[in-house]
């Protein structure tokens, strides 16, 4: 795929384009840049973390260096503790290996590395190393042998992938230029007073071409003629067929090639996919989270194919966004869930091939049980958020503003203005709505005040007049008329139904029974009330007779004990029959359908009276001949017979 590089030297911004799309941004801005060499002083030593802070300039953030990055100091002194290697105000020669991020200062190292076109000189290193991207064994052996021959003693060199198939003369020339640069740095460090900057790649064009030239590069476009000449001179050292052009249009080079638009879009969290899906990229302090969504993708009727297709598209776009936004550190990707293990492995293979050309060497860690893909990417420079954005003054970087109490939503005047602005209602309609709402609110407030006042007055009356009105605390049946809607409201809100009454009962306790009836149902209510009264009267009469009849029987038996035993026995039977008849009559008198039963009982009673007067009652005569126990059994049978009748 042919590539082109657009360089805006004044803004120190370059873009690598593939098929007209920006794949990578190269920005050399800020106070500290990767590769800068400083002469600094030790500010303070932290033995607890085996690190030290180094003052390398006027910035508020000092550089941070770990004991493992001290390089020559540690090798020469062979000390284990950092306190034995460094002391406050000590001069140190360091290089920026990571630019400042967030609240952290630049990361420093004592292992200096001076990059060239084909080689990287390591003044304090050892041996000859070859790039892993050179795969041919013969070429690796050739470069290895060449490096051993030309390497100065006490130094190390790294042969870059650009040296593949390059002549020995060009590689030697590159090494000589690097050695000369190192000599100038040493001379400057001897004369300079720390903290000071000793070396920086000031030629931005040369730096971009040195780090990003590759066989697929076909064109370089610069904004000035002078810059084009320097680029041609640099590229003439090899046989690379790269066209160098100068931007001659009047508009800005970044606007002409839509690089500024690509930067703005890269600052947004959402990235749309060609098929209709999209991804969401959210950076945090600890890691970066990427979520994949299918969106409006409808190309395939099979859900499995839809998910796999969307995930593969997302994998390609994520690989591109990682380079474009320069996202480093820990990255978590939440692809759309796939049930097939085969589809998961196919996606991982596809994603691995998409990130293999990334110079920051992303490493896929694993696919978790939740379907999350974990990977790491080397931090190289500042990401796009740190370069082209700043903290919001309103939300302080939270991305949202706290809104605990939104008074505007409850303010009718604000509602009025919002409706007018939205054009949903005209002024007259809005005024009508607001006036009606105000009337409803006023009416509601008056009702609430009346209810509260009524309840308060009832509570006061209850406390002062309870003993006067109902000293015995007797039970009371309270009947309340309600519609179905009123009963539903009161039951739902848990309100006392007596609140609906105009005159509240003074004494309400657990003995009171509350009955809810429907309005306009007077007949049913009166029938129920009369039925309850009748039942109560029947119960009272029954209880009264149960208590009075035994006393009358005992009195009659006492008066007739000394008379004829036969008459006594007869009197007992008659008294019991009369009692049963009176009890039945008193109960049946309340029911019209019992009239015939009462008449038959009266005729039976009259007939027995006639027999008693004549003295010819066969039953009494027969009972006189029975023993006392047999008479008692006979009386019991007659009682049961009378009760059954």
Image (cartoon, helix red, strand yellow):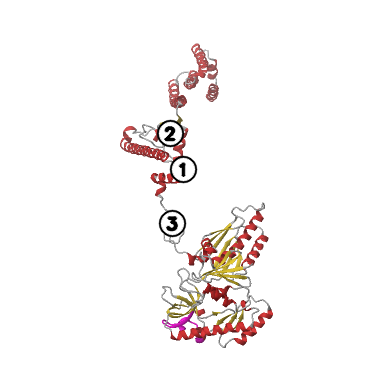
Q: Which residue is mark 2?
A: 513
Q: Which residue is mark 3?
A: 401
Query: Crowding near pointer 2: few (<14 within 10 Å), some, many (20+)?
Result: few
Residue 167 in magenta stretch:
no
Q: Quadrant of the C terminus?
A: top right
Residue 84 in magenta stretch:
yes
| Magenta-highlighted residues | 76-94
Towards the viewer: 452 or 137: 137
Residue 387 x, y percent position in the rendering: 48, 67
Measure the C-alpha gap from mark 2 to mark 3: 56 Å
Q: What element does badge 1 sit on?
A: loop
Which numbered disc flags the more N-terminal residue, 2 or 3?
A: 3
Is 290 drawn above or below residue 232 in the view shown? above
Is 38 drawn above or below residue 297 in the view shown? below
Q: Nearer the viewer, mark 2 or mark 1?
A: 1
Towards the viewer: 625 or 320: 320
Residue 298 x, y percent position in the rendering: 63, 52
Q: What element does badge 3 sit on?
A: loop
Which numbered disc flags the more N-terminal residue, 2 or 1?
A: 1
Q: What element does badge 2 sit on?
A: strand
Residue 290 x, y percent position in the rendering: 56, 61
Q: Which residue is mark 1?
A: 424
Can you name the residue that lies furthest to the bottom here?
Answer: 153
Residue 219 x, y percent position in the rendering: 60, 70
Q: Is residue 144 left or right of residue 604?
A: right
């Amino acid at each position: 795929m042919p590539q082109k590089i657009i360089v805006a030297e004044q803004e120190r911004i370059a873009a690598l384009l593939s098929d007209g799309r920006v794949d990578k941004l190269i920005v050399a801005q800020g106070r500290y840049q990767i590769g800068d060499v400083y002469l600094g002083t030790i500010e303070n030593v932290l033995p607890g973390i085996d690190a030290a802070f180094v003052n390398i300039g006027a910035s508020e953030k000092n550089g941070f260096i770990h004991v493992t990055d001290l390089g020559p100091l540690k090798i020469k002194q062979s000390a284990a503790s950092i306190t034995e290697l460094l002391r406050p105000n000590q001069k140190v020669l360091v290089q920026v290996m990571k630019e400042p991020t967030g609240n952290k200062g630049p990361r420093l190292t004592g292992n200096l590395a001076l990059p060239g076109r084909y080689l990287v000189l390591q003044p304090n290193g050892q041996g000859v190393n070859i790039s892993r991207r050179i795969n041919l064994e013969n070429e690796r052996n050739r470069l290895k042998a060449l490096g051993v021959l030309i390497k100065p003693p006490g130094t190390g060199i790294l042969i870059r992938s650009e040296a593949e198939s390059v002549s020995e003369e060009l590689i030697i020339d590159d090494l000589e230029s690097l050695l000369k640069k190192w000599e100038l740095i040493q001379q400057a460090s001897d004369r300079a007073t720390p903290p000071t900057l000793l070396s920086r790649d000031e030629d931005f064009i040369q730096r971009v071409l040195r780090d990003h030239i590759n066989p697929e590069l076909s064109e370089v476009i610069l904004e000035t003629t002078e810059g084009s000449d320097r680029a041609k001179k640099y590229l003439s050292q090899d046989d690379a067929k790269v066209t160098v052009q100068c931007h001659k249009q009047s508009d800005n080079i970044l606007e002409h090639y839509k690089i500024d638009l690509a930067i703005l879009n890269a600052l947004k969290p959402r990235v749309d996919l060609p098929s209709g899906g999209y991804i969401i990229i959210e950076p945090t302090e600890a890691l970066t989270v990427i979520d994949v969504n299918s969106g409006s993708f409808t190309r395939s009727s099979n859900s499995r194919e839809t998910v796999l297709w969307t995930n593969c598209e997302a994998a390609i776009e994520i690989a591109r966004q990682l380079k474009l936004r320069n996202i480093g550190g820990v990255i978590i990707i939440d692809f759309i869930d796939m049930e097939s293990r085969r589809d998961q492995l196919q996606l991982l293979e596809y994603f691995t091939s998409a990130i293999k050309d990334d110079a920051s060497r992303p490493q896929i860690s694993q696919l978790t049980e939740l379907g999350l893909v974990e990977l790491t990417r080397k931090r190289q420079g500042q990401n796009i958020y740190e370069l082209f954005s700043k903290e919001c003054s309103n939300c302080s970087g939270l991305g949202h503003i706290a809104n605990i109490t939104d008074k505007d939503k409850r303010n009718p005047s604000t509602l009025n203005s919002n409706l007018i602005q939205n054009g949903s209602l005209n002024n007259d309609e809005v005024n009508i709505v607001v006036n009606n709402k105000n009337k409803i609110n006023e009416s509601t407030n008056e009702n609430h005040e009346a209810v509260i006042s009524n309840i308060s007055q009832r509570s006061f009356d209850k406390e002062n007049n309870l003993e006067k009105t109902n000293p015995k605390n007797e039970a009371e049946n309270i009947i309340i008329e309600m519609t179905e809607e009123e009963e539903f409201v009161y039951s739902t809100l848990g309100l006392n139904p007596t609140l609906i009454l105009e005159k509240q009962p003074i004494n309400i306790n657990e003995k009171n029974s509350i009955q809810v009836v429907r309005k306009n149902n007077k007949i049913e209510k009166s029938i129920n009330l009369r039925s309850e009264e009748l039942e109560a009267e029947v119960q009272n009469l029954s209880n009264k007779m149960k208590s009075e009849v035994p006393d009358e029987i005992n009195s009659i038996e006492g008066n007739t004990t000394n008379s004829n035993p036969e008459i006594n026995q007869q009197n007992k039977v008659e008294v019991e029959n009369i009692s049963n008849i009176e009890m039945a009559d008193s109960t049946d008198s309340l029911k019209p359908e019992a009239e015939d039963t009462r008449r038959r009982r009266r005729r039976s009673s009259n007939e027995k009276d006639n027999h008693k007067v004549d003295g010819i009652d066969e039953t009494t005569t027969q009972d006189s001949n029975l023993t006392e126990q047999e008479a008692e059994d006979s009386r019991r049978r007659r009682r049961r017979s009378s009760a059954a009748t």
